[in-house]
Image (cartoon, helix red, strand yellow):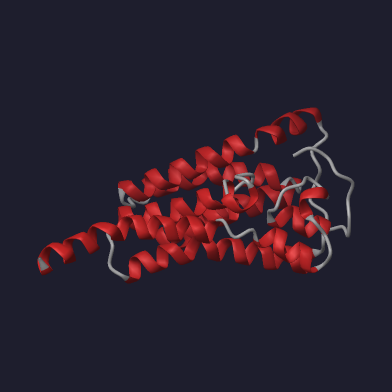
Amino acid sequence: MGGSGTGSGCDRVPLILLAFGYLCGSIPFGLILGRLADVDVRRTGSGNIGATNVARSVGLGVGIATLGADVLKGAVPVLVAEWIGTPPGLSAAAGVAAFLGHVFPFTLHFAGGKGVATALGVLAVLAPIAVACAAAVFVAVVGVTRFVSLGSVLAAVCAPVALVALGYPRSVAAASLAMSAVIIVRHRDNYARLLAGTEARFTVRKRQAVRPG
């Protein structure tokens, strides 16, 4: 009976890690930090809870804090999974669960952010060299164009390619590909604005009028 109980406990570890990851991802740091400054970021700028809209709507410092928090909530479940000695596939799955928690948080009726910062946190633990490649693409694109959306999408495209090229485990590459696909789809409204020339370039403002996105 003791052996059976131990096995049952081990069988529950993946579910516990996935639940923990999703719960971490579901913490809406952008909304929380915005409200501390008396701003509901869902009603300003693009209406998104991510760091870019927080920086535009509340201020650069709060935007940076949101970025850091959203990165951490992707990294922490992966770090916990690795700390207890799970295989790369389960560590990656815990990270993807955190990413999905950010994009589809139960705390906000499943209407969350686009997932870029949380995916960054996941991959920063699993594949730091590949993340450096994707980050370089993001910085270069945003530096030249000031379109955060374009930089985010191109970095998302770069990440799984870099993972495969650098020989990371297939499970990690698959996790990156899944997150990249969601990020690309979540930016679908930005593509129309980019083509129409109406996409906002990144600037930091105190408040903005509400617009779709």
Residue extending farthest bottom: 83
144 and 61: which is toward the camera: 61
Left or right placement of residue 166 versus residue 132 in this view:
left
On-image quarter of the C terminus: top right
Left or right placement of residue 142 versus residue 153 in this view:
right
Identify the residue at horizontal 27%, vertical 67% (top origin): 85
Q: Quadrant of residue 186?
A: top right
Residue extending farthest front: 1
Q: Quadrant of residue 38?
A: bottom right
Residue 116: x percent and y percent?
59, 51
Left or right placement of residue 79 versus residue 202 in this view:
left
Please say whether residue 202 is visible from this viewpoint. Answer: yes
Give the vertical position of 25 relative to 150 (above or below).
below
Identify the residue at horizontal 30%, vertical 70% (top origin): 84
Identify the residue at horizontal 79%, vertical 51% (top origin): 202
Residue 185: x percent and y percent?
58, 35
Q: How many marks?
A: 0
Residue 1: x percent and y percent?
10, 65
Left or right placement of residue 93 versus residue 159 in this view:
left
Residue 154: x percent and y percent?
59, 42
Identify the residue at horizontal 40%, vertical 59% (top origin): 126
88 and 37: which is toward the camera: 37
Please say whether residue 165 is visible from this viewpoint. Answer: no
